[in-house]
Image (spheres, rainbow, N blue to C red):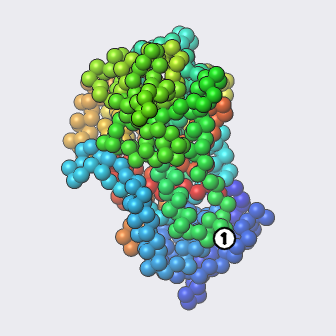
Amino acid sequence: MDLGQTVVNHTTPRRCGPYARLHCGANITSQAPRYSCFVRWRSIMQLNDYDPGDFYDELFIAPGKPRLEAIPLIERLCNLSPTELKRRHEAAQIALFKLGVTFNVYSDNQGSERILPFDIIPRIVAMDAWQKLDTGLKQRIQALNLFLADIYGNQKILNDRIIPRELIESASGYLPACQGLKPPGDIWCHITGTDLVRDRQGEWFVLEDNLRCPSGVSYVLENRRVMKSSFPVVFDMMKIQPVEEYPNYLLETLLNLASPAISDPTVVVLTPGMYNSAYFEHSFLAQQMGVELVEGRDLVVVDGYVKMRTTKGLKRVDVIYRRIDDLFIDPLVFRSDSALGVPGLMEVYRSGKVAIANALGTGVADDKVIYAYVPEMIRYYLGEEPILANVPTYLCWEPKQQSHVLANLDKLVVKAADESGGYGMLVGPHSTAAEQASFAEKIKAHPRKYIAQPTLSLSRVPTLLGDRYTGCHVDLRPYVLYGKDIYVNPGGLTRVALKPGSLVVNSSQGGGSKDTWVV
């Protein structure tokens, strides 16, 4: 058990009429909560019958046995009638709708804009588990930053053959045009969203890194706002770590990129526009930081500087928080057909007259093949053992590993190296023979493009589906800011697979979100 406190002698709850005793242990340390472990156990959406099964459940150890850190929440839920809980759940959805918490799905023929589904039952992470994540994420982002500086610099890791050179040069995210770049402070990955999962034993694994334009933090902040109004008593009772300071830390990180000679730097958020899947987040973060939200057409390069069109004329821009993929940001250097970027931006960036977060070229570290080498990066650059492990990964470009993958497609998860959002993926145990045959041909034709991983038994959280609690699989995306110091926002986006039994949590594939409480 990953509780931070010792809990022993668990027994089955004893029901006495409308009441039941949650026997949380005869021996609980002095750090245990002051509130009673005796609660009124109403039959609320079958919570008392909720069975975590043989998965690691984030709230329950066994039927009727909540984890120590979850007891105040469970007590509160057990004292709400089914009608009241459902009312609060619907009120939360309505509140998010009114706040405009949406995302776009380009392939959806029912209309592109959707409200992100939200479940009112939060995920709880104990502080001792969070401290390990915090330390491990800081270690990982340091190594990835050193890797990016090296790849676009002296390439020592390639010359020492820690990573095969051909893997870097064949990565779609590797940009030769960025060779020799020197971002301010030699920091490349200013904003990172790292996807984590927990296995059947409750151990954490890194699923993937997102270093280009990681999205989702706006949902973290808005989910928390709604949850505070839904469960004010619980928030008063529990020491839940705040997430609301993220915009302040983000602005501080961006301002840190400007030249010290500039007394009042101008920061902007560069968005592709209102039809982008994360446009709500772009506008939200700009508003929270008090900076301008701009599109490429609002910026122009004049006299060697990037300037913003305003009603009072052109104004110099010093820092750009870009939410546009690298290849669209400057049509003179990358995609000539891009109407989203700023012609000439790359030249100004190279000269050091504008800073960009994240730095261009960071997409090479998002590649799922390169991901497999992050533990080696940590050892190579930091001389340390990784605190957070990768999910075991098979590289299909290696003949022996490819043979193993092809022989076990029904058991593995196969992912395209440069895809995201749950696309380009085969979940072996849930796939058909025809789908497996199709992926086998793809792997043999383009082995560099695919990796495979074992199917993990992802942890679950009770989720309100219809009129009952169902255990649904979740992952976690904490957000890391790298400025003068490294800051890990204490929580993150818990994405939940809202289809029972599904392992795919992406919003574009029918997933939703939960608030994440670090207590």
Instruction: Please tell me in which quadrant of the rendered image residue 277 appears.
Output: top left
In the rendered image, residue 262, in percent from the top left (x then y), is placed at: 61, 25
Instruction: Please tell me in which quadrant of the rendered image residue 489 appears.
Output: top right
Q: Is residue 340 above or below residue 27?
A: above
Residue drawn at x 47%, y 51% is 219
How many numbered marks does the figure carry?
Answer: 1
In the rendered image, residue 348, in percent from the top left (x then y), is placed at: 46, 17
> In this image, 422 relative to 314: left or right?
left
Say which of 113 and 375 sits in front. Answer: 113
Residue drawn at x 65%, y 67% is 236
Does dot 1 land on a helix, a strand or a loop? loop
Q: Which residue is mark 1?
A: 24
Q: Which residue reaches farthest front?
A: 312
Q: Is residue 245 above or below residue 467?
A: above
> In this image, 394 relative to 188: left or right?
left
Quarter containing the N terminus = bottom right
Residue drawn at x 62%, y 54% is 242
Say which of 177 and 150 sits in front. Answer: 177
